[in-house]
Amino acid sequence: QPFITRISSASGPEHTTLTISGGNFGSTAGKVLFEGNPTIATDDTEGIQSTTVCSPMWQDDQIRVEVPSGAVTGFVKVLVDVSAPAGAAVKTTNERSQMFTVNTNPLPPVLCSVVSPSSIDPVTKAASPGLANGPAGAQITLSGKFFGATKESTSIVKIHTVGLPSTEMIPITTTTWNDGTITGVIPATAGAGVAQIVVERMVTANSRQVCNSFTVFGF
């Protein structure tokens, strides 16, 4: 049976990107339904189906989905196909999470990936452009959505090396900025090690989205 441990946000508007964490989701994409009224949504056909976003979109322990148009406040349900014994029909099972509240707040930015043309293969150490690593001074490309058509005065990209105090967030100088792509340069002062890249965009308050890890090499 699949199980849900948490959803990255308990509320948000339509088209908000959510990360659903748990287990036994399988490697083949199933469905995520926004049920609406939890008192009547009791089977696998009720609710509005979401679409997956970013890559990897569906993993055994994590799913990234977008709150669909028309979603209303209610439970979120994960549906997966469960292998049955030989000769038996494949069945569908589900797991409900906590309630998700649909509101009309502005959309926060979504950061799907950060890659560098200066990256290397982590095993062979040979040049391998397009991976999530690189040295200080390397150019990086951030991909996602809702960054804003242009860089606003309150928008910023920062890097934080894991293990350092959370206050040590270093601004990244950006070179291009549009709603789906940002380019910039890893600062020389970024510490070597696994880091987090954060996009902040002021809406009603600071909205930030942390991407997957980016490794800064010490050379």
Image: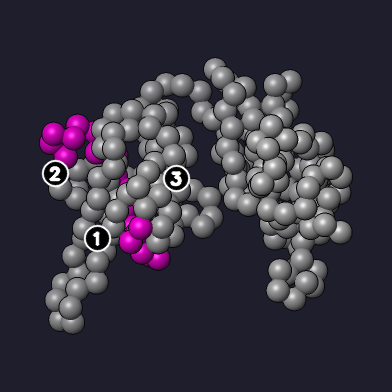
Residue 104, relative to residue 141: is it above or below?
above
In this view, the residue in front, 164 or 88, is 164
Residue drawn at point x = 42 percent, y = 35 percent: 9
Give the quadrant of the N terminus.
bottom left
- Few, some or many C-alpha atoms within 10 Å of disc 1 (few <14, some 14-19, many ≥20)? some
Badge 1 is on which residue?
1
- Few, some or many C-alpha atoms within 10 Å of disc 3 (few <14, some 14-19, many ≥20)? some
What's the distance in space between the residues labelled 1 and 2, CA to CA? 17 Å
Q: Given this view, does label 1 or label 2 mark the residue nearer the observer?
A: 1
What's the distance in space between the residues labelled 1 and 3, CA to CA? 19 Å
Badge 2 is on which residue?
42
In this view, the residue in front, 71 or 187, is 187
Residue 198 image offset from top left, x and y in percent:
65, 38
Q: Which residues are magenta?
A: 23-42
Is residue 40 found inside the magenta-colored segment of the image?
yes
Q: Given this view, does label 2 or label 3 mark the residue nearer the observer?
A: 3
Residue 35, relative to residue 79: is it above or below?
above
Disc with the residue nearer the chain's start (1 vs 3): 1
Residue drawn at point x = 19 percent, y = 50 percent: 44
Quarter of the image where one finds residue 209 = top right
Q: Count the marks.
A: 3
In the drawing, what numbered circle is on residue 19? 3
Q: Is residue 171 visible?
A: yes
Secondary structure under badge 2? loop
User: For the residue marked with disc 1, what is the amino acid?
Assistant: Gln
User: For the residue marked with disc 2, what is the amino acid?
Assistant: Thr
